Amino acid sequence: MSIVYNKTPLLRQFFRGSPIPQFFLKYECMQPSGSFKSRGIGNLILKSIDKINSSNLNKRPQVFSSSGGNAGLAAATASRRLSIPCTVVVPTATKERMVNKIKDTGAKVIVNGGHWSEADDYLQNHVINKIDLNEIEPIYVHPFDNPLIWEGHSTMIDEIIESLNEQNIDIRNVKAITCSIGGGGLYNGLIRGLEKYNLASKIPIIGVETNGCQVFNTSLKLKKLVKFPKINTIATSLGTSTISAKTFENALKYNTKSVVVDNIDVIKTCLRYTYDFNQVAEPACGAALHLAYNTGLIENALDTTLTKDDIIIVIACGGSSNTVQELEEALLKYKLDYSLPQTPEYIFTENHTPILSPVL
C-alpha cells in the first residue's frame, strides 16, 4: 500500500456468453485517480520527491505533466496527496469534464496543442524552461515512458500473486493476462512484475487496441517501431501515435499477442458491461473487457482451446474519459443497431436523447 495508490481487488466475474474459462478482473478503477495510472505516475512523483529532498538542493519540487486524460489526472491527484504544486498541459481536444476534474485537485491547467505530442512540446519548451530553476526542481511526468512508471505498475502483479495464493489458486492455471495497450506503460509494468516471479515467459500477455490507433499491432507485424501520422479512435485514452521502445523490445522477447477490435464493438462492450455490473467503463478499458465477452478472440490469439479450469486475468484499467450518455451518443454517431439478447436496448425521448433501458 502506498500513499499515492491503492491496493485493488482481484475478483472472479461471470460474463454472460463466456462460461469458459474463468475470468478474474483486477479492478484498477478503485485507484485515487480512477485508473491504473495512479500506480506508475504516483511512484514516479514520489520517488522523484525523495531524490530531490535527499539531494540538499534546497529546491521546491513541482510536477509538470502533459496529458489530456487519465495520466494528467493521476499526476494532479498524486501531487495533491503529496502537497506539491502541479501543472498539466492538455490538448484542445480534452473534454471539459476532464479539465475540471484536474482543476478540482488544485492543479494548474493549460490548454495548448491539437493532440498530446503538441501539448507535451508546449510543456517542455514554453512552461518548464521558463521556471526559476534556482527555486524549483521540476518533475517531468511522461504519460507512459519512464522506468519508474513501469515499476509502479508492476505492483499489480505482486497483488495478483498474493490474491491467487490467498484463494489457493494454482498460478499454472493462469493462461493469459489481457490488457489494453496505448503507449505501453501498463504493459511494461506487467512484464516487469512477471519477470520478478520468473513468469514472463510462462504467462502470455494479450495486448488489445482499437482500430485507428493500432500502433502496437502494426509494429509487431512490420517488426519495427512505427509512428502513426494520425490516430482516430473512440478509445481516446489509447490514442498515442507510437509505443515506447521498451514496449516493442518486451513484445518481441516474450512473444506477446496482439488483438485489434472495432470501435463499434468496444462501445457495445462498454454499455453491456455497464448493464451487467453497474460500472461505467471507458472505451480504453472496454477494449480489454471485450475479450471477456468474446472468448474466441483469446483462443485465436493463444492458438489453443480453453477449458473450465483455465484462468484469464483481465486488467480493468479504469479511467474517467466517458459517461454512459457519451457512449450512447457514440452509438448514434456510428449508426449502430445495438440489440443484444437480454441486454440493454435503446429507447428515445421526444428530443431523441438515447436512454439506457433494460429489455423487459
Image (spheres, helix red, strand yellow):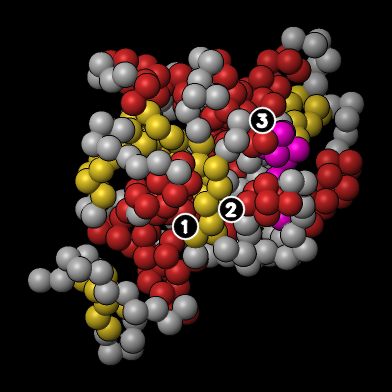
The amino acid type of the residue labelled 2 equals Leu
The answer to whether mark 2 and mark 3 are in CB contact below 8 A is no
Q: Earlier in the sequence, mark 1 or mark 3?
A: 3
Q: Is residue 337 magenta?
A: no
Mark seen at residue 283 = 1
| Label 1 environment density (alpha carbons within 10 Å; few <14, some 14–19, many ≥20) | many
Work out whether 339 lies above or below 27: below
- Helix, strand or loop at label 3? It is helix
- Name which residue type carries label 1: Pro
Q: Check residue 253 in the rendering and tell me which mark sits there, or answer none.
A: 3
- In percent of width and height, residue 128 lies at 83, 41
Q: Are marks 2 and 1 in contact (CB under 8 Å)?
A: yes
Sooner in the amino-acid sequence: mark 2 or mark 3? 2
Quadrant in which residue 45 is drawn:
top right
- Side of 327 where 247 appears, left or right: right
Kindly identify the residue that appears in the image at 46 percent across and 53 percent down: 287
Q: What's the CA distance linking mark 1 and mark 3?
A: 28 Å
Q: Which label belongs to residue 238?
A: 2
Query: Mark 2 and mark 1: span between their CA atoms?
Result: 9 Å
Q: Which mark is residue 45?
A: none
